[in-house]
Amino acid sequence: VVRESGIVDGLVLVNPMHITASIYVNDLEYGLHQDLMDWLERVAPFGGLDGRDGPEYLHHRTGEDNGDAHLKRQLLGQQVTMPVRDGRLHLGTWEQIHYAEFDGRRPKRILIKVVGVVPA
């Protein structure tokens, strides 16, 4: 996407466009990824803290059953903005942009905005 845009210096914004999905930056190391997902499940378990789709998710009073997905998204964040330098994403050595979906029952969109300087 950055290459197609033609910019050499600027920013890329990536947004999952859904309230139960996150875009975040981290290392692409599968043990770390699993640790993160396990931590999120301990903090906001799918079945509620009591293991029975608990009443602590007041969101469930609306008829939805994805209170945990909303909380997990809040913990990981909504979007990332990354720098572009020399026509490429300027990431740290181990940085990767990740997508996490916590309620996979609906079609999703991802918004990518590229803003920057195009050479004359």
Image (spheres, rainbow, N blue to C red):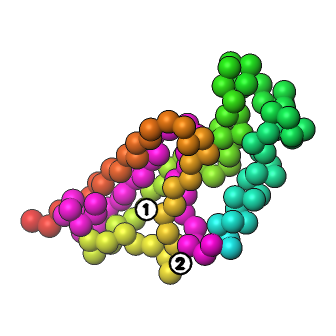
Q: Earlier in the sequence, mark 2 or mark 1?
A: 1
In the rendering, at what x and y percent does residue 96 appear? 49, 69
Find residue 105 and name its label.
none
In the rendering, at what x and y percent does residue 90 appear? 40, 72
Q: Judge left or right: residue 86 versus residue 79.
A: left
Nearest the eye: 92 or 59: 59
The residue lying furthest to the left in this view is 120
Provide the secondary structure element on which disc 1 rests: strand
Q: The C terminus appears in which quarter of the rendering?
A: bottom left
Q: Is residue 76 magenta?
A: no
Q: Is residue 8 magenta?
A: yes
Q: Judge left or right: residue 100 versus residue 34.
A: left
Q: Examine the image and state in which quarter residue 38 appears.
A: bottom right
The residue at 56%/53% (across/down) is: 100
The residue at 84%/27% (across/down) is: 55
Find residue 82 and name its label.
1
The residue at 36%/59% (across/down) is: 11
Location of mark 2 (residue): 94
The residue at 61%/45% (across/down) is: 102
How crowded pointer 1 is (Cα within 10 Å; few <14, some 14-19, many 20+) is rated as some
Specify whether residue 117 is in view: no
Find the magenta span and give its range: 1-30
The residue lying furthest to the right in this view is 50
In the rendering, at what x and y percent does residue 49 appear? 86, 40
In this rendering, the answer to whether 49 lies above or below 90 is above
The kind of residue on which mark 1 rests is Met
Provide the secondary structure element on which disc 2 rests: loop
The residue lying furthest to the bottom in this view is 93
Q: The N terminus appears in which quarter of the rendering?
A: bottom left
In this rendering, the answer to whether 107 lies above or below 95 is above
Nearest the eye: 36 or 75: 36
The kind of residue on which mark 2 rests is Trp
